[in-house]
Image (spheres, rainbow, N blue to C red):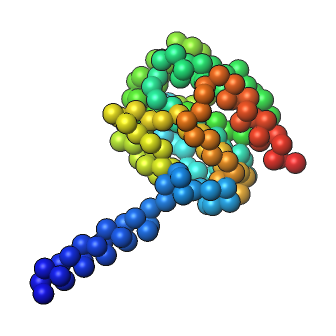
Amino acid sequence: MKTALLSLLVVMFVSSFFLCTKTLAELKPGDPAPSFVTTDHDGKKVDLNELKGKWVVLYFYPKDDTPGCTIEAKEFTELYEEFLENNTLVYGISADTKESHCSFRDKYRLKVPLIPDEKHRLMSLYGVEVKNGVASRDTVIIDTSGNIARIYRHVKPAGHAREVLEFIKENSM
């Protein structure tokens, strides 16, 4: 009897955890974006709730200063002013340290704020796959109401920033 009761309690606990946790695969356009408060590489506060009224792009990438990640970061930088003109804030997120982000940003003169997520908190919140401490290359676009507008999974870095900008332009009208 005790074993059956204990088993039931364990099943209920585990089930409640999974029922309360949405992953990226479960998040879909129209869902409220999971809120968070963190800091970028410069120590500036980033509070998603304070960004309502703007489009927000969260692009998750594997590692600073690697070929694909550099291409993606440079393309978001090249289009940064155009994103701002379209009421859009862009944040790059990886598991790298603040110091690594600062070095990466300085080396390539990146304009996009980078968010260190060493403990994978944001990755977990948005269901981004992490293998060996490295995030998959996923992008989440959040609309001006704070809802998920689009999710891109396992993207190819070349041309992705332009694709994201075009999506925002098409959906801002």
List x then y, in percent, for residue 163. Answer: 73, 33
Q: Image height check: is 40 above or below 35?
A: above
Figure check: 146 above or below 115:
below
Which residue is at 82% across, 47% downward?
172
Query: In this rendering, does residue 55 appear at all?
Result: yes
Relative horizontal placement of residue 50, taking residue 101 as reference (left or right)? right
Among the 4 quarters of the image, the one containing residue 108: top right
Where is residue 171? Give x, y as percent.
81, 47
Instruction: Compare residues 114 and 162 and report the one nearer the observer.
Output: 162
- Please indicate, yes or no, whether residue 35 appears anywhere in the rendered image: no
- Give the farthest residue toward the right: 173
Q: Residue furthest left?
A: 2
* Residue at far bottom of view: 1
Percent from the top left, x then y, of residue 84? Answer: 75, 34
Residue furthest top in the image: 107
**Total number of numbered discs in the rendering:** 0
Query: Residue 96: x percent and y percent?
Result: 41, 29
Note whether 48 is above or below 111 in the view shown.
below
Left or right of residue 105: residue 51: right
Q: Nearer the viewer, residue 28 or 109?
A: 28
What is the quadrant of residue 49 in the picture?
A: bottom right
Q: Residue at x 54, y 20 (%)?
A: 68
Q: Residue at x 40, y 39 (%)?
A: 130
The residue that appears at 24% across and 78% down in the rendered structure is 9
Which quadrant is the N terminus positioned in? bottom left
Q: Nearer the viewer, residue 106 or 12?
A: 12
